[in-house]
Amino acid sequence: MGLWEPVMENAGQAAEPFGHLDGREEIMPDCVELLSDLKLPTLAEVLDPISFARYFRGVSLKFSGGEAIEEIEFRVLRHVAGQRCTLEIRLRTPSGGQVLIGKVFRKDRIRVFDFMTEVHQAGFGLHDEFSIPEPLAYLPSLRLLLQERVEGPVAEEIFWAGDEASQAVAAERSAQWLARFHAQAPRRGEVSPPDEYLNTKRMRECAPRIAKDARFTLKVDRLHDRLEEAAAAIRPLELCAGHGAYRPDHVILCPGRTVVFDLDTHDVADPARDVARFLVALRRLALKLGSIRALDKPYEIFLQTYLAAGQPGVETNLRFFEAAAYLKRAKRILDGRGAHWREGTEAMLDEGLRVLEGATTP
């Protein structure tokens, strides 16, 4: 392991392969859109199997078991234009092959690899019940992180289509992982104190942007006022390692192993922030199922499991962070103007008010 360029994370269902190296073909034409992403300047080199093989040659023995790599095949798992692209990388050797996950970043992210390495060594390794994907390497010249590909159902899929028993297990294991991470993971990255949360640029923009739509003006003004009151009542807690984007779609439930990926936005924060983001993600998923109350049971199981295992005092601060996350989600729904955007925006505002006022909002 070293400063080569591998990173790995689960990234959901793979797309069709678009390029491979076997001495006959190069990049297939359907990746033109990816290659035109000028804000990811190294992506074209990564997606060109010939070029990638040249960069990869120095570290390939680690992933091929000493065998020659006969073919490299890519599948695009997720592309966030101008920010990052997550790939599945298949290496074929005479006796089989191996599959890795690679993430190409816009900017150098060696700090993500370093943090994952520290977390992995702090009790979140391959054989630990609560873990992260093994960080394999980082290639600075390509801004590419390589990591273990983890097989298993994602918690979001279970909440979407699983039965009540499997949803309960997914909620409990997700909460246990987060409590362990907050307690044991090294504190690295930017410090995000609670008293600065409302003053971030994104949060300052939320209420005015939603209030421009007259249908939501009264509710958003009321919610913002309640948020300021809740912020003033925040209890000082010991800040801990923060995941930064803890959601059900980042949790993989393997037999005997709960694995959480996507630590790109890790920081040091109030533990209630990560708890709130997971709970709001459950409410968002419930809305897609037809009712914001559809996942009340896993919501409560996750919350009670975390509160029993986590740092005392989290519940007091949780009201603020959860309501603030509903406000941010309302803005995103409003900006996106997708199907049922009016209902979705209002549901998020109502839920934020319910959390802060302790009652069902009309």
Image: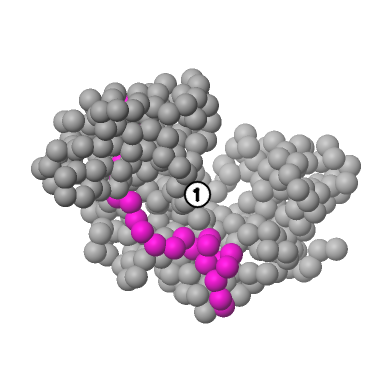
Does residue 326 show up?
A: yes
Residue at the outermost left position:
66
Q: Name the residue rendered at 63%, 37% in the picture.
A: 202
Judge whether 292 appears above or below 82 on screen.
below
Corner quadrant of residue 203: top right
Residue 96, position as x, y percentages in the image: 21, 50
x then y, percent, for residue 353: 75, 59
Does 131 appear above or below 325? below
- Is 102 magenta? The answer is no
Is residue 59 toward the left or the right of residue 239 in the image? left
- Left or right side of 317 for 7: left
* Residue 118 relative to residue 152: left or right: left
The residue indicated by pointer 1 is 245
Q: In this rendering, would 352 be left or right of 131? A: right
Q: Residue at x 67, y 48 (%)?
A: 329
In the image shown, does 269 or 150 lie closer to the viewer?
150
Seen at 40% across and 56% down, the residue is 260
**Residue 303 shows in this picture:** no
Q: In the image, is residue 151 part of the stretch drawn in magenta?
A: yes
Q: Residue at x 18, y 30 (%)?
A: 57
Vertical order, 274 against 53 (above or below): below
Residue nearest the viewer, comparing 167 with 243: 167
Instruction: Give the x, y percent position of residue 253.
Output: 41, 65
Q: Residue furthest bottom?
A: 165
State the extent of the magenta-drawn residues as a range: 142-164
**Label 1: few (<14), some (14–19) or many (≥20) C-alpha neighbours in 10 Å:** some
For the residue labelled by badge 1, is the local secondary structure a helix, a strand or a loop? loop
Q: What amino acid is at disc 1?
A: Ala
